[in-house]
């Protein structure tokens, strides 16, 4: 366990020292701040634009961080052979992956925390538009990003960095579409299309469940039972993906 | 006592190229390294030395065959806690300083913090990196990286050192330091297994050697056994040689004598010839400067093994 | 490194090849950028002098657009709404027509059916643009999607009352409003007045009396008292009295 935490700590340190992270963060905060300009262009719906844009930015920039830094974390180690000095120690391959995952999770949490703080400050400053539900929305976005982080790590255990990035982004797109796909197939599809759609739906994560921005912005009722189940679903799915990554990693040769 | 390293019938295939054809990189490798030995693993580039080492450490999986390291199966994690490994052309996290990196490795080895606090500076000093301890590794020269690699291999008091081309990229001073380090480890009772293609280092340092050519172990055993005690020729260097004595001795010699700055060197085919030559020269009142028996050296054996391996 | 004449680090001499290349490159840069500036100003002038041709905005159907938005539909609704406000605001001064206003509002509200402000302001804009059927359609769409919101039936009732003078419809929608949580306090009074307006004077009188008895707010009781007096006066007048004011 201590080895896992050591690796997690080092993964976090590594990303913190990566200057690209700061550029992404500054850009994200700027985008969130730009909602103040958009507010002046509108009549009605002012509070919405701040929250909608803020949550969208957190999702997208969080996605960038999860995908690109996550892939670097594993692929770069393998590519540059720095992994030899790790795996020749009594570090099990599973510990390596879990440690990297935790480290990246912490990085994500910190970055999302900063962006969320910016959003909350903005929402509070613009009066009347602050709601604690924003935190709930951010929390579920974080869970969605953890799933994508695990996915990025899975792909980078056996694929090149570029392909891993593409596959992970594809999972994000399909994951967000899978609910719509099901509906579409139910209405229009033949049997084989329905089967494919259902297969994809259960195989890939249904990411639209983690998107609470509609409920947050419109103050719609949220069922705590559904939320709890969604949280469990997210955790189980991420754990499952990480486990597959560990299994693949076990048999990998490091030339 | 059980051998520290024990390999039997180890084979490794790789899939090469678009069609995934199988290429056999190691064939039926069997090898033993005993406790306290320094074993030199030799071979031309591409022979499979690094592959063997990676199999020992579990970085790659064997296609067939088995082995044990420190009594545990290949790739066992707990065995790795007692092994210090230096990879070929090592690279380490550039954004860390030398000290941070060693501390990180030490924590992965679960060395207690107190011990680590002492060990890290001590090791850095031993490999001559105490000045650069707080510099980022990205600023290290190749030699410095190599030395840092040795330091991290020595962390945690390993029983077995596995070094892949430890001398590569070092200048003669660096190579001597590494040789000295290996000798120190040997004196401390550690087993050292290292691969190299630089022969002179090996002769000075190893107890046993193995020569790998194209994935096959062509020769292995203690150095003096391989080299044999057989004296191939004797170099006799003398001064003040009168011409008749010169001619007489040269007839005994296997090849023409060498003349250099007033000295003459004869290459005599054996002890009998040597005795006869000395008799002549002493009678002629010549002065003997040196008598050096020439045995087969490692290079000869290496080239012989390479030739055998090519067929 | 001294001593090797040609390799010293003095800057290039006046007419050396490197200096010449530098000068030429800078010269080309100056000419090219100046030319670009001139052309840019020309383009700007053209854009201003050309009368703004009506931009045919392409309105995708919300159901088709939705999957492509990957869950960011709320944001898309917001951006569509901003565009709507800009569209309306840019034309209101010139007293032009608003041919695409309905499509804008319809798209924004289709992307997010819970976007109350879009229905409310959209309906208002459409009313100002005198597109009453469109406005009614938007309000009804909003009411269907947000049955618990009192603002939308309230605004629809107002539209019928003020613009269309359709009192039965106004009455209906304000009755709907009356049943919804958070509705303004003046709704019940509006209802009773409307009853009177469409000729249901007895009903109106009854309701005022009810309000007078039930309310403990002195201002309201005063209003009720006044209305009761007015109605009783009206009822005593001959039937020729026009129920509409």
Image (cartoon, rainbow, N blue to C red):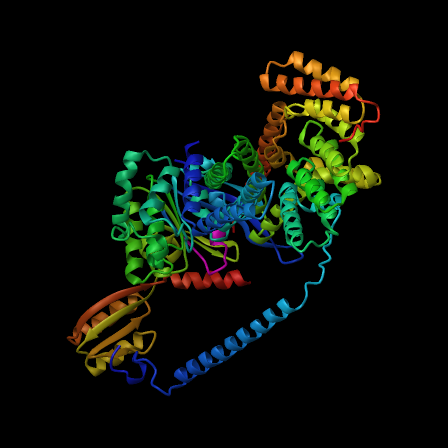
Please report the residue visible at 75 percent of the width from the left and 37 percent of the height from the top. A182
Determine which quarter of the picture holds residue C114: top right
Please report the residue visible at 59 percent of the width from the left and 33 percent of the height from the top. A216
- The percent position of residue A91, horizontal first and vertical second, equals 45, 38
> Which quadrant, please, contains the C terminus of chain C?
top right
Q: Is residue A225 left or right of residue B302?
A: right
Residue C213 in the image: above or below residue C63: above
Whether residue B76 is visible to the viewer of this picture, yes or no, is: no
Q: Is residue B205 left or right of residue A214?
A: left
Viewer-side residue, C174 vs B107: C174
Residue extending furthest toward the left: B285
> Which quadrant, please, contains the N terminus of chain C?
bottom left
Please report the residue visible at 54 percent of the width from the left and 77 percent of the height from the top. C35
Residue C220 in the image: above or below residue A44: above
Q: Say whether residue B50 is magenta.
A: yes
Please report the residue visible at 58 percent of the width from the left and 48 percent of the height from the top. A41
Viewer-side residue, B283 vs B306: B306
Magenta span of residues: B41-52
Residue extending furthest toward the top: C213
- The percent position of residue A255, horizontal first and vertical second, equals 52, 51
- The percent position of residue C33, horizontal first and vertical second, equals 51, 75
Q: Say whether residue C109 is magenta.
A: no
Whether residue A162 is visible to the viewer of this picture, yes or no, is: yes
Viewer-side residue, A3 vs A250: A3
- The percent position of residue B228, horizontal first and vertical second, equals 37, 57
């Amino acid at each position: 366990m201590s080895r896992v935490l050591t690796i997690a700590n080092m993964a976090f340190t590594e990303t913190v020292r990566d200057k690209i992270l700061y550029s992404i963060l500054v850009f994200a905060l700027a985008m969130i701040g730009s909602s103040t300009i958009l507010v002046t262009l509108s009549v009605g719906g002012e509070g919405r634009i701040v929250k909608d844009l803020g949550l969208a930015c957190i999702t997208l920039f969080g996605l960038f961080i999860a995908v690109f830094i996550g892939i670097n974390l594993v692929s770069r180690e393998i590519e540059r052979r720095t992994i030899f000095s790790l795996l020749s120690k009594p570090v099990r391959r599973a510990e390596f992956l879990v440690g990297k995952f935790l480290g990246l999770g912490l990085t994500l949490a910190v970055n999302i925390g900063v962006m969320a703080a910016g959003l909350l400050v903005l929402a509070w400053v613009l009066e009347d538009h602050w709601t604690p539900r924003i935190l709930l929305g951010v929390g579920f976005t974080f869970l969605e990003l953890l799933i994508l982080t695990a996915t990025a790590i899975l792909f980078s255990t056996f694929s090149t960095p570029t392909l891993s990035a593409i596959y992970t982004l594809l999972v994000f797109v399909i994951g967000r579409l899978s609910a719509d796909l099901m509906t579409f197939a139910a209405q229009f599809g033949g049997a084989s299309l329905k089967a494919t759609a259902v297969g994809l739906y259960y195989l890939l994560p249904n990411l639209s469940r983690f998107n609470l921005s509609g409920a947050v912005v419109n103050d719609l009722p949220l069922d705590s039972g559904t939320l709890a189940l969604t949280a469990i679903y997210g955790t189980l799915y991420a754990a499952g993906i990480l486990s597959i990554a560990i299994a693949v990693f076990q048999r990998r040769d490091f030339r | 006592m059980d051998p520290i390293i024990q390999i039997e019938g180890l084979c490794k295939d790789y899939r090469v190229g678009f069609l995934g054809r199988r290429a056999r990189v190691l064939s039926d490798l069997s090898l033993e390294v005993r406790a306290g030995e320094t074993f030199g693993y030799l071979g031309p580039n591409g022979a499979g030395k690094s592959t063997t080492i990676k199999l020992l450490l579990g970085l790659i999986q064997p296609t067939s065959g088995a082995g044990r390291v420190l009594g545990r199966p290949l790739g066992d994690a707990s065995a790795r806690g007692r092994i210090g490994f230096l990879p070929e052309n090592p690279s380490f996290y550039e954004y860390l300083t030398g000290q941070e990196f060693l501390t990180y490795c030490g924590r992965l080895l679960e060395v207690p913090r107190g011990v680590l606090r002492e060990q890290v500076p001590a090791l850095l000093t031993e490999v001559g990196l105490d000045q650069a301890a707080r510099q980022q590794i990205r600023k290290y020269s190749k030699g410095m990286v190599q030395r840092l690699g040795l330091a991290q291999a020595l962390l945690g008091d390993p029983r077995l050192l596995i070094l892949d081309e430890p001398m590569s990229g070092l200048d003669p001073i660096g190579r001597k330091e590494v040789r000295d380090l290996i000798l120190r480890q040997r004196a401390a009772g550690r087993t050292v297994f290292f691969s190299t293609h630089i022969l002179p280092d090996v002769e000075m340092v190893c107890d046993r050697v193995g020569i790998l050519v194209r994935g096959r172990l062509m020769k292995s055993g203690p150095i003096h056994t391989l080299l044999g005690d057989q004296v191939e020729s004797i170099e006799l260097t003398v001064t003040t040689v009168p011409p008749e004595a010169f001619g007489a001795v040269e007839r005994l010699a296997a090849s023409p004598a060498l003349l250099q700055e007033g000295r003459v060197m004869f290459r005599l085919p054996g002890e009998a010839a040597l005795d006869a030559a000395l008799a002549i020269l002493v009678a002629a009142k010549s002065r003997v400067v040196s008598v050096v028996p020439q045995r087969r050296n490692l290079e000869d054996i290496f080239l012989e093994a390479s030739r055998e391996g090519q067929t | 490194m001294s001593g090797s004449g040609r390799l010293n680090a003095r800057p290039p001499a006046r007419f050396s090849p490197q200096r010449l290349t530098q000068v030429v490159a800078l010269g080309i840069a100056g000419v090219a950028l100046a030319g670009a500036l001139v052309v840019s100003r020309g383009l700007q002038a053209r854009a201003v002098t050309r009368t703004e041709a009506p931009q045919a905005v392409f309105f995708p159907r919300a159901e088709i657009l939705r999957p492509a938005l990957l869950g960011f539909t709320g944001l898309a609704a917001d951006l569509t709404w901003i565009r709507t406000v800009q569209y309306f605001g840019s034309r209101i001064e010139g007293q032009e027509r608003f041919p695409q206003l309905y499509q804008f509002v319809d798209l924004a509200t289709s992307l997010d059916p819970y976007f109350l402000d879009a229905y409310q302001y959209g309906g208002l804009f459409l009313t100002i643009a005198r597109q009453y059927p469109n406005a009614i359609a938007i309000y009804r769409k909003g009411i269907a999607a947000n049955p618990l919101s009192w603002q939308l039936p309230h605004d629809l009732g107002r539209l019928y009352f003020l613009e269309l003078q359709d009192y039965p419809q106004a009455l209906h929608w304000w009755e709907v409003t009356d049943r919804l949580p958070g509705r303004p306090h003046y709704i019940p009074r509006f209802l009773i007045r409307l009853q009177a307006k469409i000729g249901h004077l007895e009903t109106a009188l009854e309701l005022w009396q009810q309000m007078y008895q039930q309310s403990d707010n002195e201002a309201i009781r005063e209003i009720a008292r006044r209305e009761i007096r007015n109605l009783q006066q009206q009822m005593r007048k001959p039937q020729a009295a026009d129920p509409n004011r």
